[in-house]
Image: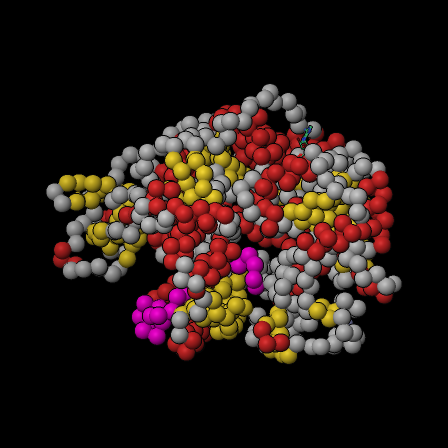
Amino acid sequence: MTYANVIVDISVEKLDKTFQYLVPEELQEVITEGTQVDIPFGSRTLTGYVIELTDEPAYDREKIKPVLGIHEGSVPMEAQLIALAAWMKNNYGSTMNQALKTVLPIKRKTKQVQHRQVQLALPEEEAKKKLALLEARHNTAKARLLRELIGAQTLDYALVTGKLNVPAATIRGMEQQGLVIVETAANYRNPVAHLKQEEYQVKLNGNQRQAVDEILSDMREKKTRTFLLKGVTGSGKTEVYMELIAHVIAQGKQAIVLIPEIALTYQTVMRFYRRFGDRVSIINSRLSQGERYDQFERAKSGDIDIMIGPRSALFTPFPNLGLIIMDEEHENSYKSETAPRYHAREVAIQRAKMNQAFVVLGSATPSVDSYYQAMQGNYKLVELTERVGQKPLPVCEIVDLREELHAGNRSILSERLQELMEDRLQKGEQIMLFLNRRGVSGFLSCRDCGYVVKCPHCDVSLSQHAGGRMVCHYCGYEEPQPVVCPSCGSKYISGFKAGTQKVEMLVQKRFPNARLMRMDFDTTRTKDSYEKILQAFANHEADILIGTQMIVKGHDFPNVTLVGVLAADMSLHVPDFHAAERTFQLLTQAVGRAGRGKTPGYAVIQAYDVEHYALKTAKEQDYEAFYGQEIAYRSMMSYPPVWNLLVVHCSGEDPERLSAAAEALAAFLKEAIGQGTERVLLVGPADASVARVNDIYRKVIYMKTENYQTLVFLKNQMEYYRKENPLLSNVTVQYDFNPASGF
Ligand code: ADP
Ligand code: ZN
Ligand code: ZN
C-alpha cells in the first residue's frame, strides 16, 4: 500500500478529516493502521495516526507529501485503540470511522460543572417507534429532541433549549409522557464514590482456590490467553474474578470487568467496591458522553485500576492492561447490533493479545461458541462444580401443559405449581414466576398437541405476518395461516399472547392474599426502578415476583424457595438457530434463582414440548448433555461455531433497485465463490424478516463456510465490487458475522 490516510487530532468530531501522505518504500513494511507517524503539516512537523492504507491516491499524486517517519517513543494508547479499530473494521465490516467511534471515547471540551441534563427514558427501539409517531403527527420540536436523544442518550439542558430550540414547556410535556427525564447531574467524578468501603472478609473455599491457582499458574507460564470459567450459579465466580484482579493489580496492571448492563446492579458493584475501594469505577449507558470520557481519562491517568461496565468498557484506555473479565459471557448483549457488529468476546481476546493480557470468560451456562472453543483447546476450561456452602442445586420438575389442558385446566398455572405456591405462601417463603417472553410474537402453536407450524424446507418455525400469511424468514416460503391444527385438528391453535400484566391479574385472583410485584418493561421504565423493585422484593415487601427474563439476573434472594417458569418452550420456536441455546440458558438461570438461602429450592418448568432436549437437560441442570446435543445439531446444519456465517444486509428506498442490486451482488459472490477452492454455501437474496422498516426495504444474503477468513475475504471483495458498480450506489450494505440472534 502506497498511501496513508492520517488523522492529526484525535477528537471524535474530527475523525472524518484525514490527510493523505505517501508511504516511502522503506516504511511500507512497518507502517500499519494505528501507527503513529511524523508528518509535514504546512510549515510544521506534527504527529498523526494512520487510520487507513490504500493504493488509491486521493488527489494529484505529484502533490502528496511523504510520511517523515515513525514517531519515536512508546506506543500511546490511541495507537493501540486505533489498531484495534482497524482490526474490527476488517473483521466485522464497517467504515474506519464507525470503528473509531466505537473504540475512542468522545472528547468533550466542556467544563465539568453542575448542569441540568435531559435523558432518554425509553429503550432505543421504543424511542424509535415514538419518534416515527411524533414525526407522523408533525410534532417537530418533540421529534427533534427525541431524534437527538436516540443518538446521544443524554443532552445538556442548555443545548436542548438553545441549539435544538426545544421550548422548556415541551421538555416538561415530554417528561410527563415518560419520554425523557430531566435531572441535575452532579459533578460525576466517580460514580461509585458515594459507596462506603467496608472491610473485606471473604476467604476462598477449596474449589475457588483451585480455580484461581490453576488460572494463575497458566498465566505465569503463558500457556493460555483465554480461560473459560464455568461455574454453576452461586458457585462464587465473582470471588474468583476478584482474586485474579488482586493479583493483576499487585503487578501494577489494570483490569476491565465486563458485566451485562442488566446484571450491573448495586449489589454487584458494591462487592467490587468493598474489596478495591475507590480504585474501581463503573460506566453504564446512563452516563453521558462527557461523563464517560471523564471515566476514561481517569483510567488513562492511573486514577483507577478497575473498570466495570457493559460492552463499551472494553475500550477503557488503561496504560497497562493485564486482565479482562467477561461475566455472563453467554449474554446476547455482548454482540453489537450496529456497525461494526462486533462480539465483545472476540474483541476482548484481540485486545488482550495486543497487550499481553489475559481474558477470563465466566458463566454458569457458557455459550456454545465458547464451550466449543474450549473443547477445541483454544480456551482453557476451568470449572467450579459446587455451590458455595454446599447448598444443593434446586430440584426441578417439568409439567406437561398439554396434559393440564386435557384434564380441563385452562389456567396459566398448572395444578402442581398452584399446590406448591400455596405451600410456600403458607410458610412465608417467596416465589418467583418467570414468563418466558422471548420470541412470543410470531409463531403459532397448538395448545392441544404442542404442534408448531414450521417451514417444510428449513428447521425453523414460520412467523405470522399481516394478512394471515405464515412466512419462513430463512427461505421465503409462504403459506396461509391454518385455522385448525394441521396435526390434530384442534381449534386451539394460536400465537401465545399472555403478558406479565395478565399473569399478575390471574395470579392475584387465584391467591387474593398474596402480595404481588411485577417486573417487566412497563414497570422498569424510569431510572433505578429496576433496582428498586429487586430491593423491595429482597426486603420481602412482596411474596411473589412476576417478571420476564429481567428477573433471572443479578440479585440473590435467599428467601425464594420456589421458581415457576410459565411457558418454558415459547423461546424454542423463535426462527433462530440459537433458540435451543437461549432456552436452555434462560431455564437454567431461572431455576438457579431458587434455594440461594437455607431452605433448598424447587423449580417447576411448565411446557408443551416436554421432550425437547433443551428442557430435559435444563431440568437436570446438565450442561454437558445439552452441549452434546446442540453441537451435533450445529454440526449437522453447518451453523456456528462449527462453521461460520456471514449475513449481508442490503437496504434501500427503492424496492426494484434494491432487488436488482442484491441480485447483482449475489451473482458476483457466486462467481467469487466459484473461483475459490473452499466450500461456501450461499443463500439469497431473500426478503429480511422485517422486509420494510420506515419505508426502507431490506434484503439479506447469507453465506456459510468453515473458515472465518474466507468470509472476511468475500466481504472485502464485495466492498471493492460495490465501489465500482453503479447498481449498488443507492444501496446500503452491512455485514453481520456470526449473528447473535435473528438467524
Ligand atoms: P456466582 O457469581 O458464581 O453466581 P457469587 O460469586 O455471586 O456466585 O457467590 C454467591 C454467593 O456466595 C455470594 O453471596 C457470595 O458473597 C458468597 N460467596 C462466594 N464465595 C464465598 C466464600 N469463599 N465464602 C463465603 N461466601 C462466599
Ligand atoms: Zn394440535
Ligand atoms: Zn424455509
Q: Work out whether residue 285 can be spotted.
A: yes
Which x, y percent locates residue 542?
Answer: 72, 40
Number of callouts in the render? 0
In this view, the residue farthest toward the front is: 169
In this view, the residue farthest toward the right is: 407
Q: Residue at x 66, y 25 (%)?
A: 203
Q: Which residues are magenta?
A: 722-743
Quick one: quadrant of the N terminus?
A: bottom left
Which x, y percent locates residue 287?
Answer: 45, 40
Quick one: quadrant of the C terminus?
A: bottom right
Q: Is residue 191 above or below residue 447?
A: above
Q: Is residue 423 left or right of residue 152?
A: right
Whether 92 is among the magenta residues is no
Q: Residue at x 75, y 46 (%)?
A: 563
354, 525: nearer the viewer: 525
Whether 733 is among the magenta residues is yes
Q: Work out whether residue 591 can be spotted.
A: no
Q: Residue at x 72, y 44 (%)?
A: 516
In this view, the residue farthest toward the top is: 199
Which x, y percent locates residue 361?
Answer: 57, 42
522, 374: nearer the viewer: 522
| Coloration mode | secondary structure
Q: Residue at x 31, y 48 (%)?
A: 163
Which x, y percent locates residue 468?
Answer: 62, 76
Q: Is residue 460 left or right of residue 698?
A: right
Q: Is residue 359 above or below residue 522?
A: above
Q: Is residue 674 left or right of residue 549?
A: left
368, 654: nearer the viewer: 654
